[in-house]
């Protein structure tokens, strides 16, 4: 990006204003940066040494200024990339915004519908040039194939790795795998004692993650020590579609299932029991995401 710091700050101010005006439609669709960095740190722990070296070398070749190029920072790249032209040309925004979630409807759950019937990637097409109307499940599968294929150029491998680092995390945010005709919880105003007000989606993206601790690396270390070898082995099984269905169930039974009735103004006041229950749910989803991100990379970058 060739903007000067001054132009950047003006852009940020405009973006902030645009987000404020647009309200529900303009909020982030992702774990916040902290959640993604925690997933990255957990995954890093479970990478095979040769795979870690390979992944770190690919990231070290990155010249993109949107993030720093360490493993944890690069987990946030896909959000920065999506938002990089959100206020201008919207090329990256419109091409990639739907790839961050799979909106399985609570009332009529159907992953094929949520994935736009899985548009095929024409042979010879890079996954980043695929259909804009596609879901996070399909994009994980496509970028994993791209990362593993022997004919993939180093530049295409780097792009595939950066999208995977982010999307495996997104898939585990329950409100990225579910919808109740409310834009994945973006349409629900909530408030909770000590956590302020916001949207249900944002609370699960950010507020509940921040309750785990202030430093993502420390939080990740704490979570890693709780993961047993048997859990790591079990969680690594299955496919991204299975992981989406699992996150959907968490949303159905907990995130939406335990919501109180809204007040007269339509705002949901989350009781202390709801906030407390979010801790282990978020920790487990981040732990699973880290183990599974490592699994995807260990498979894709395994030495023959
Ligand atoms: Zn995202």
Image (cartoon, grey):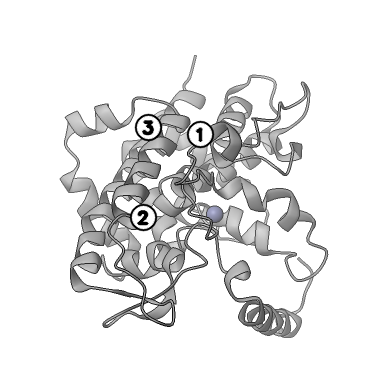
Residue 65 in sight? no
Asked if 121 appears above or below 190 in the picture, the reply is above
> Residue under circle 1?
54
Separation of marks 3 and 2 at Cα, in angstroms: 19 Å
Asked if 155 appears above or below 238 in the picture, the reply is below
Crowd rating for badge 3 (residues with CA inside 10 Å; few <14, some 14–19, many 20+): few
Separation of marks 1 and 3 at Cα, in angstroms: 9 Å
- Residue placed most toward the observer, 247 or 285: 247
Across and down, in percent, residue 262 comes to 36, 73
Crowd rating for badge 1 (residues with CA inside 10 Å; few <14, some 14–19, many 20+): some
Q: Is residue 146 left or right of residue 262?
A: right
Residue at figure coordinates x 74%, y 49% from the top left: 95
Q: From the viewer's perspective, is the residue at label 1 or at label 2 nearer?
A: 2
Q: Are marks 1 and 3 in contact (CB under 8 Å)?
A: no
Residue at figure coordinates x 51%, y 65% from the top left: 186
Across and down, in percent, residue 64 comes to 67, 56
Comes first in the chain, label 3 or label 2 = 2
Asked if 256 appears above or below 15 in the picture, the reply is above
Residue at figure coordinates x 58%, y 71% from the top left: 24
The extreme right residue here reads 89
User: Image quarter for residue 229?
Assistant: top left
Crowd rating for badge 2 (residues with CA inside 10 Å; few <14, some 14–19, many 20+): many
Comes first in the chain, label 1 or label 2 = 2
Instruction: Give the quarter the ligand 1 occupies.
Output: bottom right
- Residue placed most toward the observer, 105 or 221: 105
Instruction: Label 2: state its secondary structure.
Output: helix
User: Image quarter for residue 36?
Assistant: bottom left
| Label ID, residue 39 | none
Across and down, in percent, residue 259 comes to 31, 63
> Residue under circle 2?
38
> Residue under circle 3?
49
């Amino acid at each position: 990006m060739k903007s000067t710091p001054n132009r950047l700050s003006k852009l940020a101010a405009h973006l902030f204003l645009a987000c404020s005006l647009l309200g529900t439609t303009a909020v982030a669709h992702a774990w916040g940066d902290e959640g993604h960095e925690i997933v990255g740190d957990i995954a890093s722990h479970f990478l095979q040494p040769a795979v870690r070296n390979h992944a770190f070398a690919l990231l070290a070749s990155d010249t993109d200024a949107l993030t720093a190029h360490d493993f944890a920072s690069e987990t946030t790249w896909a959000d920065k990339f999506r938002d990089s032209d959100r206020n201008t040309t919207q090329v990256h925004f419109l091409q990639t915004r739907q790839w961050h979630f799979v909106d399985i409807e609570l009332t009529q759950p159907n992953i094929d519908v949520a994935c736009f019937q899985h548009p095929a990637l024409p042979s010879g097409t890079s996954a980043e040039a695929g259909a804009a109307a596609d879901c996070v499940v399909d994009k994980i599968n496509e970028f994993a194939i791209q990362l593993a294929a022997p004919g993939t150029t180093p530049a295409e491998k780097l792009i595939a790795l950066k999208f995977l680092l982010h999307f495996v995390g997104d898939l585990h945010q329950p409100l990225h795998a579910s919808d109740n005709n409310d834009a994945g919880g973006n349409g629900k105003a909530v408030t909770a004692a000590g956590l302020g007000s916001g949207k249900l989606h944002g609370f699960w993206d950010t507020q509940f993650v921040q309750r785990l601790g202030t430093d993502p690396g420390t939080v990740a270390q704490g979570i890693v020590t709780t993961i047993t070898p048997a859990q790591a082995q079990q969680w690594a099984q299955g496919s991204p579609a299975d992981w989406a269905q699992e996150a959907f169930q968490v949303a159905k039974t907990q995130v939406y299932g335990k919501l109180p009735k809204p007040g007269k103004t339509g705002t949901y006041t989350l009781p202390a029991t709801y906030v407390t229950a979010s801790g282990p749910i978020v920790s487990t989803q981040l732990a699973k995401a880290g183990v599974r991100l490592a699994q995807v990379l260990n498979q894709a970058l395994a030495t023959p």
